[in-house]
Amino acid sequence: MTEKVLIIGSGPAGLTAAIYAARAGLEPLMVEGMERGGQLMITTDVENFPGFPDGIMGPDLMDQIRKQAERFGTRIISSDVSRVDFSQRPFKVWVGKDEFVADSIIISTGASARWIGVPGEERLRGYGVSACATCDGFFFRDKELIVVGGGDTAMEEALFLTKFASKLTVVHRRDEFRASPIMAQRVMDHPKIDVAWNSTVDEILGDDLVTGAVLRDTVTDETTELAADGVFVAIGHDPNTKIFLDQLELDDAGYIVVSPGTTLTSVEGVHAAGDVTDKVYRQAITAAGLGCQAALDVQHWLEANEA
């Protein structure tokens, strides 16, 4: 059986694409992955997704969207795609030893935040540890925060968080930032921001909520404790594109390249949506919007190619 459209990945982009594709009669098959639902599955309160004035837990939101996709006929496989072949149509996708063929593909495998990998980090994610200032900054009004990193991402996160935090410390392992000079200067000039140079985070402290972090001086090897209500890790993201390395055009950072204004990749009939293409916004609502766009693009493409 050849699928009309096969969706790889199940975050807001993939599930929204599934809803639109299913309602268009395309009977989508989704391979959602073992870690279904994307990064919202490790997010606690979501207060910026339209339609939920009192907020909603990330896993609950994804469960509702998933049920909506299934209601319209999306079939879901809870496994990971192991290999793809986009060299000719119909396209081939393998889930373990099982082979699936499809006239079109939507990729929504997302991107994963890089973490520092220290004690307390994983346990306190969603309870003071975050990798998204735009998502979680609002919860830290008048709080003291730590931002880990030294690139433009860290500078942008730190400056954004000054809208809420009473005080903020940027922890950087070197004696100068890697960020662009103008961004670095804005951070160093900001009255709310201190910089802990030549420092790394050894441990994030707290039982139920973050209470601080243990910093290690990279020059003297001495450790100190710094009180804080939240730790924002801003050392970048990695798009989940390894299985597409020799199949699609990727940019220097590994994100899938799409034609401007569309979701079309370098292979006709293969579309991509969400954080796997988006290194700027990385929000659930923008991912969902791109998922809608991908489904509509696929629908029009299939009609034009009489698939």
Image (cartoon, rainbow, N blue to C red):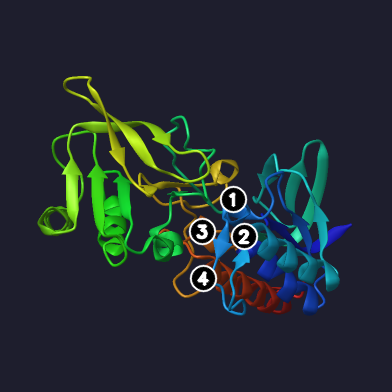
Q: Amino acid at mark 4?
A: Thr
Which residue bears the numbered disc 1? 42
Mark 3 or mark 1, whichever is nearer to me: 1
Which residue bears the numbered disc 2? 58
Q: Earlier in the sequence, mark 1 or mark 4?
A: 1
Marks 3,1: beta carbons within 8 A: no
Mark 2 or mark 3, whichever is nearer to me: 2
Q: Residue at x 17, y 55 (%)?
A: 187
Compared with residue 78, is residue 29 higher up or lower down, i.e. above or below? below
The residues tagged by marks 2 and 4 sit, at their Cα atoms, a distance apart of 15 Å
Mark 1 or mark 4, whichever is nearer to me: 1
Q: Amino acid at mark 3?
A: Asp
Q: Earlier in the sequence, mark 1 or mark 2?
A: 1
Q: Residue at x 74, y 49 (%)?
A: 92
Marks 1,2: beta carbons within 8 A: yes
Q: Residue at x 81, y 44 (%)?
A: 99
Which residue bears the numbered disc 4? 286
Residue 192 percent location from the top left of the image: 18, 58
Q: Earlier in the sequence, mark 3 or mark 1?
A: 1
The residues tagged by marks 3 and 1 sit, at their Cα atoms, a distance apart of 16 Å
